[in-house]
Every structure is written in structure tokens, then in C-alpha cells.
Amino acid sequence: MVCSVPNDIQREGLPLIHGRDVSRSFQGKEVIAAVRGLSFGIDEGRITAIIGESGSGKSTMLKLIYGLLGPDDGEVRYRGWRVPNPREKLIPGHDAMRMVSQGFDDLNTYANVWDNVASQLPNTDLEAKFHHTARILDRLRIAHLKTQRIADLSGGEKQRVAIARALVNEPEVLLMDEPFNQVDASFRETLQADIRHIVADTGLTVVLVSHDPAEVLSMADELMVLKSGKLVAMGKPEELYNRPPNAYTARLLAKSNILNVEEASLLGIKSNRAVAIHPEWVVLRIQPDAAFEVLAIRFKGFYEELSVGSGSFQLNAINTIPGQYPIGCKVDVTLSTYEVLPGEG
């Protein structure tokens, strides 16, 4: 049974989803702490992405929000009410939320697309059932697939069906675990745009998990960065990218160069703390007698990732004119900017 909300908690003006000191461990050969002391807030009508390396606790956090797992300590609240854990609910999962898992476990593989989506609606009003099903298939651009079996669809098409199935009942929150894993790069941006349009039109709140920040930097309104089960950063994507609060966030979002005090001094940076230098902040200029040279080139299509170094000191840089700096080329290194990392010496 879900406990009631004390008046003093209601007056706090909590966000839509609020976690306080949430911890969860799993017992195997040894106790594994999946998340530890998480306190967070997720606002209504926005897209929040939970990112981090594999094993950082992202999927566990998503399941705690939904109520598929109960916390060992702390609590998760939705609209101020505590989210019930599986011991308190016959069918786990919050009634106002829907979750799309990585493996499309909820899809009926041998049924067609229409039946997979329509099966989520009651038969009490068949006309409304038809209307809602047709509308959500149109919104997710899969109406042309309605007679095809799930087994015959591509990974990206299955993902759209899974999302349509989750949204046909008009939940308040959509939770997605690695939603773009099986979506081809060419269709990823289209799906992201469709989700953003649904959020803008309906006020839907989206919480998604991703191991690849590049997937969500342009999509999310808010990022939550997890490391070893702890929340190490939270904020708008552009703020965390341009002003990372720690080395982990800088490397995760931008493959940033992290320089200690001595290394920073080699580039003329006077700082008593470590600094982050994103590859695109490194400015190169061909100089025959320069101390740095190009050590490696990684072709990325319309740009190249370069490794430049002097002795044992190396930096990653970006070159937008492929072929401009061949391997062995001597280059002068300057910086367009850099970011001092708070608290990291």
C-alpha cells in the first residue's frame, strides 16, 4: 500500500519524481552496491537522460523509479507519493508510468504490429480503441507496418512498436532503457525528433538510460551522470559539456584531455587544479620547428581525431579538414579555451 504524503512534504515543492538517499544492493558471491545514496529530482514535461559507463547503476536506477525494484534505503516519490515496491503491488510498476526495456520483452513476436499495440486497450469502447491505436501508429510513423509480424521487423521498427505500445494508454511518464541500441544511426535522429515532438505536444515526461552520451546530448533537457552507483553530476547538457564538474563527466561527454598541474604548465596554463581540454579546443598550426608532432590519425568521416604529442605528453585533437595534418607533421599547439576542474588537483 502506498503511504500518504505528509503536508510538510507537499509544501516543499518537490519535482515530479524525487529520490532521497536511495541505495540498492544485490547479493551474489559478494554484495554488489548498484546505487548508493542517490538524491535527485526529475521535472515534469522534460526529457532526462541517465548516463554513465557500463555497471554505473543506470538501469537499476530506472527500475527503482518505476517500482520494479524497491530501495534498500531511502525512497522514490512520484508527485509527492512514495513509489510502491514489488512487495506492495501485485503487478510491479507505477500506474502512471510505462517502461520500454532493451530486449522488447513485452512484444508478442508472432502477432502483428496493430494487435501488439491495440492489445493494451480495453474492449469496452471499440471505436475509441481503433482511434487511439491508429493515432499512435501514425505518430510513431509505423502505420504502414500494422499488418506485419514483429518477428519480421528490423530492430529500429521494433523499437517504435515498443514505444507505441507503451504510449497508447497515454501514461504520464515514459521510461526507456537504452532506446537507441538497435536503431540504425540514419534513423536515430528521426526517432529522437519524434519523441521530442510527443513531449512538446502532450507534456509527457521521459526518463531514458544511455551508455553513449552522443545519443542524448542534443535530445535531453537534463543529464544525470552516474559513476559506480553514485550521482556525480546533474544539469543541462550544454552546461555539463562546456563546464564539466569532474574528470569523469568531461571524459564521458567529450573524450576530454585531463591534464594535471604539471602537464597543464607545458601548455602555458597556470593552475593549481587539474584542467579539462576538449579535443575541439586544441588549435593546431603547422610549424616545422614545433615541439609537438602528429602521432596518429583516426578517420571519422567529415573530421579526424588526431593524437599529437611531445615526448611522453600527448593530447587528442579534432581536425575538420581531413589530410591537413599528416602523421609526423610538426605542429604548434594553442588552446581556444580550457576548463579548470573543481576540487581536482
Image (tube, rainbow, N blue to C red):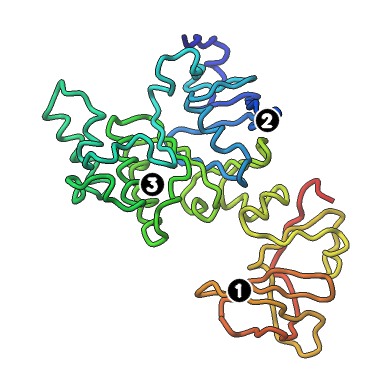
The residue that mark 2 highlights is 33
Task: Give 200 or 130, whichever is nearer the viewer.
Answer: 130
In this view, the mark in front (2 or 3): 2
The earlier-in-sequence mark between 2 and 3 is 2
Rendering quarter of residue 60? top right
Whether the residues at callouts 2 and 3 have beta carbons within 8 Å, the answer is no
The residue that mark 3 highlights is 196
Q: Residue at x 69, y 71 (%)?
A: 282
Amino acid on which disc 1 is placed:
Arg
The earlier-in-sequence mark between 1 and 3 is 3
Whether the residues at callouts 1 and 2 have beta carbons within 8 Å, the answer is no
Q: How far across and how far down the image is residue 91, in percent?
A: 40, 19
Amino acid on which disc 3 is placed:
Arg
Give how far apart the Cα atoms at labels 1 and 2 are.
Answer: 37 Å
**How would you rate the neighbour count of disc 2 (Cα within 10 Å): few for under 14, some for 14-19, many for 20 or more?**
some
Does dot 3 land on a helix, a strand or a loop?
helix
Q: How far across and how far down the image is residue 14, in percent?
A: 54, 24
Q: Residue at x 55, y 21 (%)?
A: 70
The residue that mark 1 highlights is 298
Task: Give 134 or 105, whichever is nearer the viewer.
Answer: 105
In this rendering, the count of numbered labels is: 3
Amino acid on which disc 2 is placed:
Ala
Does dot 2 land on a helix, a strand or a loop?
strand
The earlier-in-sequence mark between 1 and 2 is 2
